[in-house]
Amino acid sequence: MSLLIRRCSSVIAAIFVLVLATSCSPSPAGDTAAGSPSASFPGATAGTAAEQETWPRTITHAKGQTTITAKPKRIVSTSVSLTGNLLALDAPLAGTMATKPDSVGVDSQGFFSQWSKVARERNLKALYEGELDLEAVTAASPDLIVVAATGGDSAAGSYEQLSQIAPVVVVNYSGSDWKQTTAELARATGQEAKYAELVSKYDATIADLGKKTAAPSAPVHAIVFGGDADTAFALPSGPHAQVITGLGFTLAPVPSGADHQSDPSRKDFAFIGKEASVAALTSPDVLFIGDDAEVVKRFKGTTGFSSTKAAQSGKLVALGASTFKLDPYSATDLARALAAAYPRR
């Protein structure tokens, strides 16, 4: 497994740099069901109920096109980052990849904390940890295999081998918000109705939380704190930013002259060295993605960062370990954390 960024923090190391690995594939394309009108994302709810149940359907994805003959009944996820989206869709999961157990934001089975309870309730099986295990995938007898196009949990390099086991759909979640990613999965799994329900519920939650939230007038920074190593700054075009701005916050831009340590074409995060990070943190409010309250102590205790405006007299907010990888569960967690930190009086 190739990880194309530096170790940013203990969170990133603990979760195999699943989300922050460099993206090199184009954004997911729309897909067309065989014999039905074409659909674009996040338009997984497009068309009549009858059209949504049309099979076979051909899905256009990051590796090409895949024809799925019938609605899947045994799905295997080779990406722990996408498993939460599938669980939220009530997709019939026969098994999933897992990450390192008992690390930050991860339970004893290697499942992300934001959906581990749901996984246990549904008796979801962890097929393997880390590197792809083709034998374990085969033994699960899948009729659909879901693969991440990029990231530390990507099995896209084994697309041909996996395609000999079952139809494969490759999803590029890097830089996409959870709605777009989940819409693509909904189309592939035939769960468009559940997707519409998810979006409706989420939008209602955001609207309700927005009434209870008093966002600061000044822009805020949202980061994955790296200490003496690189720090990842959430970009205005990324999935975290969409949740944050949805509650009325303004995300501070990353200076154009900053020392970026990753692909400048990325839409989610910019990785910046320590010295440039300290200089870039000019906002009085800093939000810490994917970390608990201990990060505030580390931030204030790290030379350079301890002298920033936020550390000296501003507001430091830990959004919680579950907010590292956004899916329908953790996006809601992030919004609730913000509302709790900035209550309307």
Image (cartoon, grey):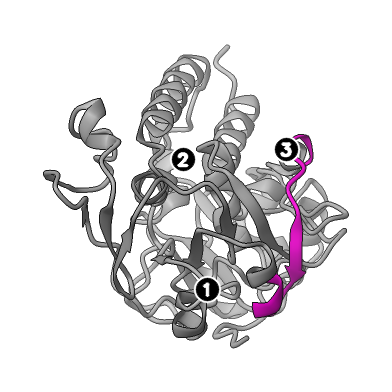
Which residue is identified by label 2?
244
Q: Which segment is the magenta one? A: 120-136
Crowding at mark 1 (Cα within 10 Å: few <14, some 14-19, many 20+) = some
Which residue is identified by label 3?
122
Disc 2, SS: helix
Residue at 65%, 25% in the rendered image: 340
**Residue 297: percent from left, percent from top:** 82, 54
Three-letter amino acid code of the residue under disc 2: Ile
Residue 202, compared with residue 157, is above or below; it is above
Residue at 46%, 14% in the rendered image: 211
Three-letter amino acid code of the residue under disc 1: Ile
Question: How far apart in space, not on screen, are marks 3 and 2 (Cα)?
Answer: 31 Å
Using residue 294 as the reference point, say whether residue 340 is left or right of it: left
Judging depth in this view, the residue of 55 and 217 nearest the camera is 55
Asked if residue 227 is among those painted magenta in the image, a careful observer would answer no
**Residue 92: percent from left, percent from top:** 57, 43
Q: Which mark is residue 165?
A: 1
